Amino acid sequence: MFSQLGPAGSADPASMFTILRQIGSGSFGSVWLAAEKQSGKVVAIKVLPLESKRRASKGDAWLDELRREITLLRTASDHPAIIRFHGSFVTPLLEAAWLVMEACECSALELMQQLAQPLEEDAACAVLGGVLRGLVHLHTKHGIIHRDVKASNVLLSAAGESKANAQCPMPNARCPMRGARCPMPSAQCPNA
């Protein structure tokens, strides 16, 4: 587990991680694949620019929202079908918050684009089973209702587990592609 978002004086996240490549971006900020320098552990880091949040918000509402999101990520990451939250940091000059989470291989949409076809029925059932377990956990244990379930938000983990992200709860599972580990039991894997 990495350091948690705390008072000024927290470690500079840029000194703790080696950025490997960008894996996503949107109105919220950007997501990067990175390796923790000390252990080599590969993670996903969501970088949220704080200056734009400060300008868009009156007072400290943006900071309260960020704290709530981090608390949600920390507490909802308590289930095997939820993407693991490892920690959070604020850069030394307070320009960005870094949310460090389990890295995933790809989204279901990316997988289908690479395969140039929809998932086979068995593969789709395996992925959706994991997504549903994660969503049920988020709803029953944490009161979270995912409002954005779609193929681009279904992520596939390297361990072959279907999961949900507590954040905008983005469900997750791993690319069943040739040469890659498959999220389905080998009897169900379309590439076995």
Image (cartoon, rainbow, N blue to C red):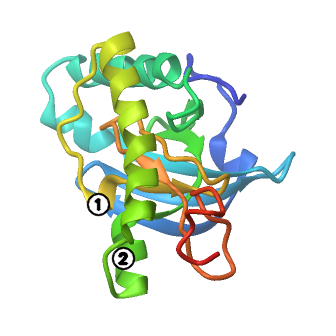
Q: Is residue 19 above or below residue 87?
A: below
Q: Is residue 120 above or below residue 53?
A: below
The answer to whether any part of residue 98 appears in the image is yes
Disc on the earlier residue, 1 or 2: 2
Residue beneath the point at 43% across and 74% down: 111
The answer to whether any part of residue 166 appears in the image is no
Residue lying furthest bottom in this view? 116
Horizontal side of residue 98 vs 124, given as left or right: right
Say which mark, if any, is on residue 151. Answer: 1
Residue beneath the point at 42% across and 39% down: 164
Residue beneath the point at 56% across and 16% down: 7
Element marked by disc 2: helix
Residue lying furthest front in this view? 187
Q: Position of residue 30 (x, y in %)?
A: 39, 57
Horizontal side of residue 174 vs 76, given as left or right: right
Say which mark, if any, is on residue 112. Answer: 2
Say which mark, if any, is on residue 91. Answer: none
